[in-house]
Amino acid sequence: MSKLAFQKTNRVFNKFKNYSWIMVPVIAIGGMYIPKLGLLLIPIMLTLMVLGFLKGKYWCGNLCPHGSLFDKILLSVSPNGRIPGLFTSKVMKVAFFLFYMGMFGSRLAKAFSYWGSMTFLDRLGFVFAANYLIPTIVGTTLALFVNPRSWCTFCPMGTFEELAYKLGTFTGFNRKTDKKVTSAQPEKCTKCGKCSRVCPMQLAPYRELSLETNQFNNVDCIRCSTCVYNCPTGILIMANAEEASQYKNYRKRSIA
Ligand code: SF4
Ligand code: SF4
């Protein structure tokens, strides 16, 4: 696929994703002056963990303030080119996760040495805000010169979601809550590749559907529904495992 093959389609926005980008300057820049703003990231990170366990990277595609910034503000000015293979590699994901969490952990440890003092909450908030500034600067730069969602391919919070999701899948807790891209009628797929060209993460659902369930099981899918809304044949849906199996049974009955 050439560099120009990726299309800038409208991404899918819910009410929260439409405006959640506002939290980026508030926390990342505001937090430099009012450090306690960084504490807002504690409930955000907890929500992200729970959602990761139940719904994979749903947070990234539907709620994340940085994701909203990339899709709502930066997509229009981004070259929207191919995301380099280095960014999407496992090595990059693991190495950046260890680097970022190591840095975050050592800053947290320093902040906690002020536990009980008047400045503790300010120091703690500053650590969170400073760590939020990293995706803001790196993600924005990559969006302006490469692709809006480059950062999301190795974002440490995305890696956290992935780990939580693996636990949710292993325990079977997310069977009903995890809605994945699913083909309701795979035999009608024309292999036009549009689902891949519009995908912000540059994945290829039509080439990777499970033969068993017709579901797209790629952990990097951010459940943004962009492919669902852009498939010209309208055969893609977001469905959990049970819903997907009903479609499969329905098709079997129709064919018989
Ligand atoms: S956009 Fe729809 S028809 Fe085209 S390849 Fe993807 S699933 Fe198939
Ligand atoms: S495969 Fe579809 S739902 Fe998943 S990230 Fe790509 S466009 Fe979004």
Image (tube, rainbow, N blue to C red):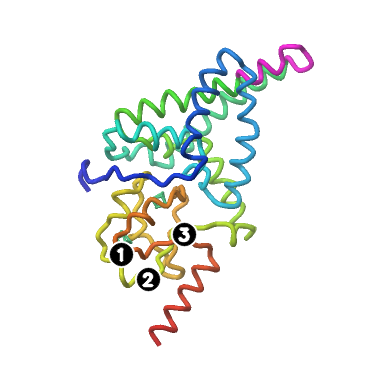
Which residue, as the protein is rendered here, is positioned at the far bottom? 256
Image vertical order of residue 141 relative to residue 59, above or below: above
**Ligand 2 within 8 A of label 3's CB?**
yes
Residue 238, numbered circle:
3
Residue 238 horizontal/vertical position (percent)? 46, 59
Q: Residues within 10 Å of mark 2 (few under 14, many from 20)?
A: some
Looking at the rendered structure, the secondary structure element under dot 1 is loop
Q: What range of the chain is rendered magenta?
A: 114-126
Q: Identify residue for label 2.
A: 185
| Res. 47 image quadrant | top right
Q: Is residue 141 left or right of residue 114?
A: left
Location of residue 192 with respect to 125 vertically, above or below: below
Q: Are marks 2 and 3 in contact (CB under 8 Å)?
A: no
Identity of the residue drawn at 71% across and 12% down: 119
Q: Within 8 Å of ligand 1, the CB of disc 1? A: yes
Q: Considering the image in quadrants, where does the C terminus appear?
A: bottom left
- Residue at the outermost front position: 15
The quadrant holding residue 2 is top left
Depth check, mark 1 against mark 2: the one in front is 1
Q: Position of residue 192 (x, y in %)?
A: 24, 60
Mark 3 nearby-residue class (10 Å; few <14, some 14–19, many ≥20): some
Q: Is residue 148 magenta?
A: no
State the SS at label 3. Answer: strand
The image shows residue 91 at horizontal and vertical percentages of: 43, 38
How far apart marks 3 and 1 lie (CA) works out to: 15 Å
Task: Check contact, mark 1 vs mark 2: CB within 8 A.
Answer: yes
Which residue is under mark 1? 233
